[in-house]
Amino acid sequence: MKVDGKNIRTIWFDESDKIVKIIDQRKLPHELAIVDLKTVDDAIHAIKEMYVRGAPLIGVTGAYAVYLAALNAPNGQISTDYLKHEARRIKSARPTAVNLAWGVDRVLSEILTISDPAKKIDSAINISAAITELEVENCRKIGEHGLSLIEQISHQKEGKTVNVLTHCNAGWLACIEYGTATAPIYAAFDKGIDIHVWVDETRPLNQGTRLTAWELGKHGVDHTIITDNAGGHLMQHAMVDMVIVGTDRTTAAGDVANKIGTYLKALAAWDNNIPFYVALPSSTFDWNLKDGVKDIPIEQRDPAEIKFVHGLSQDGQASVLICPQTSQAANFAFDVTPAKFVTGFITERGICKATEDDIRRLFPDKDR
Ligand code: MRU
């Protein structure tokens, strides 16, 4: 996507140095810092500490991490045991987004069939690059399909502003380009539709305030940051036409894990008859799970993320304590919205209802 006139992605392979480069998203919106990933440990650290975050981006980073593992194998011996061990370490960096295992396994399964070490490394790079382009294309298509929903609302409102509410950051920063939830928004904006986005701040790490607001602003999309608890009020007062969120893992039966607080937005949308859409590439479906509330692993992160707030001070970026030092905090990073509260899924293959039958209709080729 364009930032101040320059094209940039969230992750890319640097041919000359044979390393991977990423945006350090912890520093946004105050600094656009680029970081090198040279080793598998660098990649694991970047995923855990959320230099990179968002399900599709974690998936692609996981793929490149397998390349980095192969590149740095001790004594150049890229044994099967070593690769499997490193793949397990990468996959355990964050538990909720299923894209991580998807990206890692895609590269791993392919390079395990190759014996020549140099070819293994080349293949790991080629597959990672292919996965990257696949996810870019999937997000572009999500935008195309989701656009039709926004066009319908704009038509019903006779061209008046379409108000979309989104939670967390499911924008291009969470992916490579376009985003998932934001892809239809960018497509509508680019088509000249009058659109405005309510951006949930998304405590504790403020992905909405820091990241969604930043990228929408850079694209010129009108937006307003709201507190996490404001959405229900806005919905009661007809100030929201639709909700679009992303997801970290969605079961074959349509239960949606996404950033903590998504469930409450879905309940409010349900109560106010407001369409609640989830945008996702097929890499975010977990075809093996059905009961999301019971079966999707929910990451619990460091309580310090709740107790401290990070921002820009006169002396640069800093964290400040906002609660009694001794209070406990519990940091559940995701929740699950049951399928019955989801109006539909916007995928690269089109839009479907949140039912197993309709999901399978779009994806008959996916494993059970
Ligand atoms: O903890 P994060 O920032 O990785 O959580 C990200 C989200 O919950 C996104 O909404 C989700 O990954 C969808 S991304 C296109």
Image (cartoon, rainbow, N blue to C red):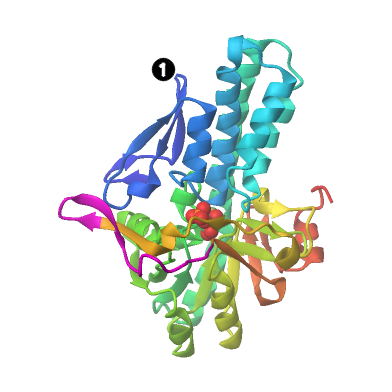
Q: Is residue 296 found left or right of 163 in the rendered image? A: right
**Span of residues in magenta:** 312-331
Q: Residue furthest bottom?
A: 237
The residue nearer to you, when weighing 342 against 365, is 342
Quadrant in the rendering for residue 290: bottom right
Q: Residue 315 at what x, y percent from top left? A: 16, 50
Residue 67 is at least partly visible in this image: yes
Decide whether residue 229 is among the magenta residues.
no
Q: Residue 123 at what x, y percent from top left? A: 64, 21
Quadrant (top left, top right, bottom left, bottom right) of the N terminus? top left
Residue 143 is at least partly visible in this image: no
**Other-residue count near label 1 (Cα within 10 Å), few / some / many at <14 / 14–19 / ≥20:** few
Residue at which label 1 appears: 16
Residue drawn 70% across the image and 35% down it: 105
Q: Is residue 196 found left or right of 146 in the rendered image? A: left
Residue drawn 49% across the image and 44% down it: 176
Q: Residue furthest front?
A: 326
Which amino acid is tagged 1? Ser
The residue nearer to you, when weighing 350 against 182, is 182
Quadrant in the rendering for residue 198: bottom left
The residue nearer to you, when weighing 209 against 170, is 209
Q: Residue 116 at what x, y percent from top left? A: 69, 10
Residue drawn 52% across the image and 72% down it: 243
Q: Which structural element holds mark 1?
A: loop
CB of mark 1 near ligand 1 (< 8 Å)? no
Q: Residue furthest left?
A: 314
